[in-house]
Amino acid sequence: MLASITPLGERGRQNRWGATMAAFVAGSVVGGALVGGLLGLLGQALAGLSGGVSPGGALVVLAVAAVVGLLADFHVGGARVPTVHRQVDERWLDTYRGWVYGFGFGFQLGTGVLTIVSGSIQYVVWLAAFLTGSWAAGLLLGVVFGLARALPQLAARGAVHPEGVRDLVQGALRWKSPVTRAARIAQGAAAGIAVVLASGVV
């Protein structure tokens, strides 16, 4: 995705990179907000029917899910993170206006599940949205998720010539492992914090 929407590419398609990026970020935020809000609403509806899960119980569920997700990330016991095997359709780049594919690509990424899921943390976030038992809290979580998915694309702003695109791709490859490690560490830390909070220590 990083190399798909660059100033160089947008100029070649006679689009403005800034406008395409604005649509991309907006689409990602809308996609995240939609999924997060719907999951929060579903949790809210189920809580109204059954009394819901206690805050402590929700934290335990979230912690367990985070740990199970990490086991799948590391393929422990042959486990794998469930995913769809598709990416955004790059034929859109030559078919639609910049704001159309910008919004469309962003929306798909913002949902977190319409393209390849690279880590279990995406499912943990959506479980958290559900466990909030609130459409508003779920929507807010989805907005943050959508922004987090979209903002790395801003790294492409310096790709104004072929060498810049090459450097962008090489930089993304260099950062892939450190970012993955950081996300997994954060996920593990979140699981630990959830357990501590659930136990009433803090």
Image (cartoon, grey):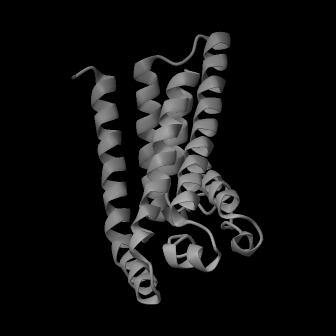
Residue closest to the eye, 119 or 100: 100
- Residue found at x 59% / y 10%: 51
Quadrant where the image shows the C terminus:
top left
> Which residue is outermost to the bottom?
163
Q: Is residue 134 above or below residue 18?
A: above
Q: Is residue 109 above or below residue 177?
A: above
Residue 93 appearing in the image:
yes
Location of residue 86 in the rendering, given as x and y in whole percent from the top left corner: 69, 67
Left-right relation of 84 to 178: right
Residue closest to the eye, 192 or 102: 102
Q: Is residue 5 above or below residue 100?
A: below
- Residue found at x 47% / y 88%: 162
Location of residue 60 in the rendering, given as x and y in whole percent from the top left corner: 42, 30
Residue closest to the eye, 145 or 180: 145
Quadrant where the image shows the N terminus:
bottom right
Location of residue 108 in the rendering, given as x and y in whole percent from the top left corner: 65, 54
- Residue found at x 55% / y 31%: 139
- Residue found at x 41% / y 83%: 164
Residue 132 appearing in the image:
no
Left-right relation of 60 to 5: left
Left-right relation of 65 to 197: right
Location of residue 8 in the rendering, given as x and y in whole percent from the top left corner: 52, 79
